Amino acid sequence: MNVVETKHLMKIYGEGDNRLYAVNDVNLTIKQREFVTIVGTSGSGKSSLLNLIGGLDRPTSGEIKISGRELTTMSEEELTIFRRRSVGFVFQSFNLVPILNVYENIVLPVQLDGNQVDEGFVAEIINVLGLKGKEYQLPSQLSGGQQQRVAIARALASKPAIILADEPTGNLDSRSSQDVLGLLKKTTKKFNQTLIMITHNDQIAQMADRVIRIEDGKLSEIAITGGDWS
């Protein structure tokens, strides 16, 4: 089953001779439970592509389907609701609410959507991510690696179809990076989610099922890595 499908996807900034093709005629499919990394030089279009897939930005033209639903025809309100329910985001900056404790940060997207928190599911996420016993601590009381684990738990809590991660280990030391990456892979597999990650780290990229290379907005290479999904 394809979770992500794009057809002739374009994102153009500027006009005339000043046009910049951030995403240029991208056709892409990503299957359920697949772990895909997107690599490329700075300004190649990685984040632009991720933002389009996540519904954070609208394309100039083309189609984007997530779990069979076409994003380009949605109103702003429909798109906001869809993002909350179907897409989990993990960024380089943890984006935790400083006055909320760990548990409150994790369940915030579910509560914003007006849904009942699945306490059993959240408890399982907390346990898998090694956050048990830290539920009532504030972000300022946690290490960087622990804060990123909370960000991952928050992304998982609404049971989205896909997790989009933009350099999620960029602010962590090498040991914490490996721990967080391992947990991200483990949890998305356990909860049957698709993981799409931007990274500048070739070693991390090669751990994925597929490496997508983008340059000047175009997909220049799609390598099958057969990465370790254990």
Image (tube, rainbow, N blue to C red):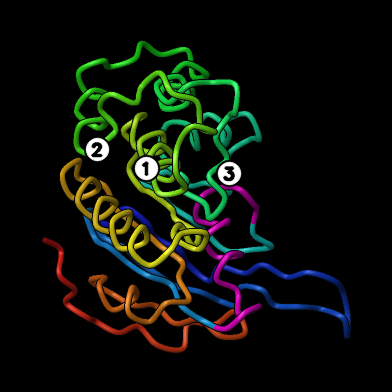
Q: Using the image, determine if residue 94 lies above or below residue 106.
A: below
Badge number at residue 130 = 2
Q: Would you say 21 lies left or right of 182 here?
A: right
Q: At x 42% / y 26%, what residue is drawn? A: 102
Under mark 2, the amino acid is Gly
Q: Using the image, determine if residue 169 lies above or below residue 21.
A: above
Under mark 1, the amino acid is Arg
Whether the magenta-drawn stretch holds residue 43 is answered as: yes
Q: Quadrant of residue 12?
A: bottom right
Q: At x 41% / y 33%, what residue is drawn? A: 154
Label 1 element class: helix
Residue beneath disc 3: 73
Residue beneath disc 1: 149
Q: At x 60% / y 21%, what residue is drawn? A: 99
- Screen quadrant of the C terminus: bottom left
Return the disc, 1 or 3, that comes first in the chain's sequence: 3
Label 3 element class: loop
Q: Are marks 2 and 1 in contact (CB under 8 Å)?
A: yes
Label 2 element class: loop
In the image shown, does 112 or 53 lie closer to the viewer?
A: 112
Mark whose residue sits in front, 1 or 3:
1
Mark whose residue sits in front, 2 or 3:
2
Q: CA distance from mark 2 to mark 3?
A: 40 Å
Q: Quadrant of residue 45?
A: bottom right
Return the disc, 2 or 1, that comes first in the chain's sequence: 2
Whether the magenta-drawn stretch holds residue 31 is answered as: no
Q: Would you say 187 lies left or right of 137 here?
A: left
State the image coordinates of residue 74 (x, y, percent, origin top left): 58, 39
Q: CA distance from mark 1 to mark 3?
A: 34 Å
Q: CA distance from mark 2 to mark 1?
A: 8 Å
Q: Are marks 1 and 3 in contact (CB under 8 Å)?
A: no
Residue segment shown in magenta: 41-58
